[in-house]
Image (spheres, rainbow, N blue to C red):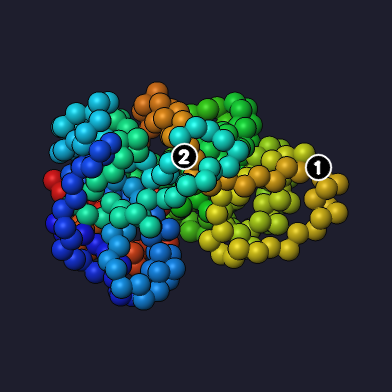
Amino acid sequence: MKAFVHEAGKLKISEMQEPIAETGEVVITIRSAGLNRRDLYIPARRGEAAEALVLGSDGAGVIEAIGEGVTAFSVGDEVIINPALRWYDNSDAPPEGFDILGMPDHGTFAEKIAISAEQIEKKPAHLTWDEAAVLPLAGLTGYRALFTKGGLRAGDTVFIPGAGSGVATYLIAFAKNSGARVIVTSRSEEKRKQALELGADIALDTASDWQQELADETVDLVIESVGRATFNRSLSVLKKGGRIVVFGATTDDTIDLDLRAFFYGQYQLLGSTMGSREELRDMVAHVERYKTHPVVDTVFNLDDALSAFDYVEDSKQFGKVALRISE
């Protein structure tokens, strides 16, 4: 089968052996896969590792074979893949044994994948293949950060720096579905416009004076994923006693924090990573209830995966990028 792999320090299309369904597994013919920023970091982490690894955490497709012991699914079922491996029940932190699909396990940038039946869910019927493929990782990440960790309630105001990321588009949609007020930022005028069209109430220029612009707003919750470039600016617009949830750091892993100002402000700082199967199922139910459609910016064919990587590396997208694997 054809796959996009990292092998001996290089990214390339390669022929890989077709998988088979072992006990408790299914084989899925992948229709479309979602590209995440995580995929961009894996080559550097693996270095010159000689063994070919199929990249990709997100995907959607059709079950073509079932291993012994699988009873909840049938051949022909349309499914999405849960990339949060072996994290079944909601908990304060991932359990021992948690990994994300796509390293060290083979991922979704291939024509087929064998995976535990515990890691799949029925595809929401209202979604296209490309929409379904980009839903699990970013949608689950946003759902846990917003609701499980952030405790968002109807009437709250949530502040989201970096409006164009895939997770941010889910945050906007989920928060608006839940009756919250949404404020976002972006350097790009076009992305600010798109965020407003998606439902954001206010879209600020990243270079503007946030405190001045939001002087009449009460921000209950901040969802941060940028890092050093925005963290303290985000904290400065959060109400005293408010909550700030961090799920990523695209600019820098470290920040300078004024501890005295932080504890006097009674702020609540929470970390968040991906989420459990329980939360994924809640997220899918939310998407089905509100007929939410993921924002798919661009779809590349599998053969053009390198171009897709460059596109995401340059942060050109508003929303998600998909790789079309098969029709």
Q: Are marks 1 and 2 in contact (CB under 8 Å)?
A: no
Question: Disc 1 to disc 2, how far (Cα)?
Answer: 32 Å
Which residue is disc 1 drawn over?
266
How many numbered marks does the figure carry? 2
Tell me which amino acid carries mark 2.
Answer: Trp
Where is residue 211 drawn, in percent x and y? 72, 51
Q: Residues within 10 Å of mark 1 (few under 14, many from 20)?
A: some
Residue 232 horizontal side relative to residue 225, left or right: right
Q: Name the one closer to the observer, 312 or 143.
A: 143
Which residue corresponds to the image point at 53% horizontal and 38% vertical from the top-left?
144
Q: Earlier in the sequence, mark 1 or mark 2?
A: 2
Few, some or many residues within 10 Å of mark 2 (<14, 14–19, 20+): many
Residue at coordinates 21% horizontally, 36% vertically from top-left?
A: 67
Question: Would residue 310 be found to the left or right of residue 327 on screen?
Answer: right
SS class of the residue under badge 2?
A: loop
Q: In what quadrant of the picture does the N terminus appear?
A: bottom left
Q: Is residue 302 above or below residue 137?
A: below
Q: Nearer the viewer, residue 262 or 214?
A: 262
Q: Can the viewer see residue 29 in this picture?
A: yes
Image coords of residue 170 (percent x, y):
45, 41
Residues 129 and 63: in front is 63
Compared with 215, 75 (above or below) is above
Residue 262 x/y as whole percent? 80, 50
Q: Nearer the viewer, mark 1 or mark 2?
A: 2
Q: Is residue 198 left or right of residue 303?
A: right
Q: Residue at x 66, y 56 (%)?
A: 231
Q: Is residue 160 above or below residue 287?
A: below
**What x and y, as percent, mark residue 230?**
63, 58
Instruction: Check disc 2 and report the residue beneath it.
Output: 87
> Element under label 1?
loop
| Residue type indicated by callout 1 | Gln
Q: Which image quadrant is residue 77 in? A: top left
